[in-house]
Amino acid sequence: MTKTCPGCGAGLPDKQPAICPYCGRELIDLSRLHTDQKITEVKQVQAQTAAIPKKIGIVVVVTLLVLFLLFMLAVLLDVPGKLKETKMEREVDSLSRDMEEAYEDGDWDKLEQYLILECEDYIDAPDYFLYRTAWYLHTFPPEFDEAVAAHDTAKMLELYEILAEDYNMRDDGIFYQIYETDDAIEDALKEEVERETAVLTEEGLEDEMYKLRR
């Protein structure tokens, strides 16, 4: 198919150029139509491009809002505090297991390491004083008896003071609210303090003994 140039009447192909190749006349203003189409396309691309930052902005705002709501929820539920508390409980449980294993195995050297050398860590465990008292009762009564046999008054009083102070802590009712105890160990401590008190009284050290317990 061909079309006719309105200027010279020449036949033109269906896909005619914007200008007649024979007379140079602009054909149906195709050049302007072509330009308008390009302008429209450019405007569409610009509109799509302009919409991208808006979409990104919306995503950012929504993301920040969600994060803020999660943060507020965490604060209201005290999530950080609960996580910290859970971590501390795990650490305390680990300390208690260490002492319990050493005590049950009769490993007094290891128990001494926990109770004396690393006391700053292990004192946080609620059963710290339970195992310390057990270690005291294992360690000091034999030394006390040796001091009595040697008539070493200073050593007798020194060892007695250690157990007496440990026993006197029980006078504070708060002690039993905070720390765990064992009836057998508590009874053994009471019995040993009473035994040493009787020995010191027989040795004529009653006044010095009671000065230590004030």
Image: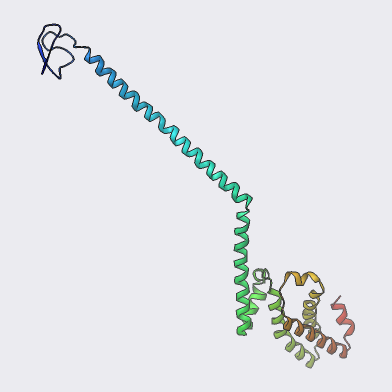
- Quadrant of the rendered structure where residue 203 is? bottom right
Image coords of residue 7 (percent x, y): 14, 6
- Position of residue 69 relative to residue 50, above or below, is below
Quadrant of the image containing the C terminus: bottom right
Left or right position of 142 against 78: right
- How many marks on residues? 0
Determine the residue positioned at 86% across, 82% down.
209
Where residue 150 appears, as percent x and y from the top left, is: 78, 92
Q: Residue at x 70, y 77 (%)?
A: 130
Q: Is residue 94 shown left or right of residue 206? A: left
Residue in the picture at 64% in, 69% down? 121
Does 98 sit above or below residue 55?
Answer: below
Instruction: Please tell me in which quadrant of the rendered image residue 195 appears.
Output: bottom right
**In front here: 70 or 169?**
70
In this view, the residue in front, 210 or 106, is 106
Residue pictured at 60% horizontal, 84% vertical: 105
Colour setup of the view: rainbow
Q: Position of residue 66 (x, y in %)?
A: 53, 44
